[in-house]
Amino acid sequence: MANRLKGKCVLLTGGVANIGLAILDSFVAEGATVAVVDIDEKRGMEIQSRHPRSVKFFRADLSRESEIREVVNNAAGWLGGINTLCLNAGVQLSGNIEDFAMEAWDKVFAINVRANFVFIQESLPYLREATNSSVVLMSSLAGKRGGPGLSCYSASKAAIIGLTNSLAIELAKDGVRVNAVCPGWIDTPFNQPIIDFMGGKSKQDSVVQANIPLGRQATPNEVAPLFVYLASDESSYVTAQAINVCGGAYN
């Protein structure tokens, strides 16, 4: 099906690599207009040049509240409003709790939680003004079950699930739906910190084989379609959900 997102004005964070790039490509293929926010200007401009009519890149450091608020309004100006907010940007840092620096904890929560809160807060006037508005946040299976070395990352992703549940209820009266996507093992460089903590790829492979009924990792292209669905009007009665994409690893 084509043009499932025709007329959607999307602000997408973290859309220049890994799952975010797969989301961007899927959104464009389905007819959306996308403002991509990321710190990697080189990749962002390359992506914009590939989709000059439907994509515009905006650089921002998501650890800086002022830059988030400015970029939301600049993106809304280019888009002509925002009816879809897709918050994919994140960072993963892994380590034993006794060795985990508070600076690292603060960095993870600044990007994974605080930045998303500010994006939603600043985007609300645009989302409320639009119809069939949707907010889709990137959480993780780690936010539901955790694991060794993932205490900080899991806590940040659990916070996203809590944020999703609360805002879905709070914003329902405004016609704004809020959902989260919870990927399990996805084959991207994003997971390298936890792979290193586990002892390398061979150890990761054995964990995947032992714990995932489908017996493999997913690709980013197997996650992106759920973002398309949640951004589309097909999911008009879906809100307050944290949906797993995990190969059966968690029920």
Image (cartoon, helix red, strand yellow):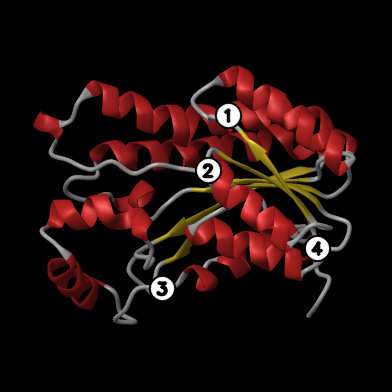
**Spatial distance from mark 4 to mark 1, Cα to Cα?**
24 Å
The disc, 2 or 3, on the residue closer to the chain's N-terminal end is 2
Up the image or down, 46 lies above or below 25; here it is above
The part of the image, by quadrant, that contains residue 189 is bottom left
Q: Which residue is mark 2?
A: 40
Up the image or down, 239 lies above or below 119; here it is below
* Residue 200 locus on image (x, y percent): 14, 62
Up the image or down, 43 lies above or below 58; here it is below
Quick check: 220 left or right of 230?
Answer: left
The disc, 2 or 4, on the residue closer to the chain's N-terminal end is 4
Q: Choose between 105 and 48: the one closer to the eye.
A: 48
Disc assigned to residue 117? 1
Q: Which residue is mark 4?
A: 5
Q: Which residue is mark 3?
A: 218
Instruction: Verify CB contact (< 8 Å) between mark 1 and mark 3.
Output: no
**Spatial distance from mark 2 to mark 3, Cα to Cα?**
25 Å
**Label 1: how many residues lie within 10 Å, few (<14), some (14-19) or many (20+)?**
some
What amino acid is labelled 3 in the image? Ala
What amino acid is labelled 4 in the image? Leu
Q: Give the secondary structure at mark 4.
A: loop
* Residue 64 locus on image (x, y percent): 53, 21
What amino acid is labelled 1 in the image? Phe
What amino acid is labelled 2 in the image? Asp
Quick check: 36 left or right of 190?
Answer: right
* Residue 128 locus on image (x, y percent): 84, 34
Q: Give the quarter of the figure containing the C terminus.
A: bottom left
Residue ID at (89%, 57%):
7
**Spatial distance from mark 3 to mark 4, Cα to Cα?**
24 Å
**Spatial distance from mark 1 to mark 3, Cα to Cα?**
28 Å
The disc, 3 or 4, on the residue closer to the chain's N-terminal end is 4
Residue ID at (45%, 42%):
90
Up the image or down, 132 lies above or below 122; here it is below
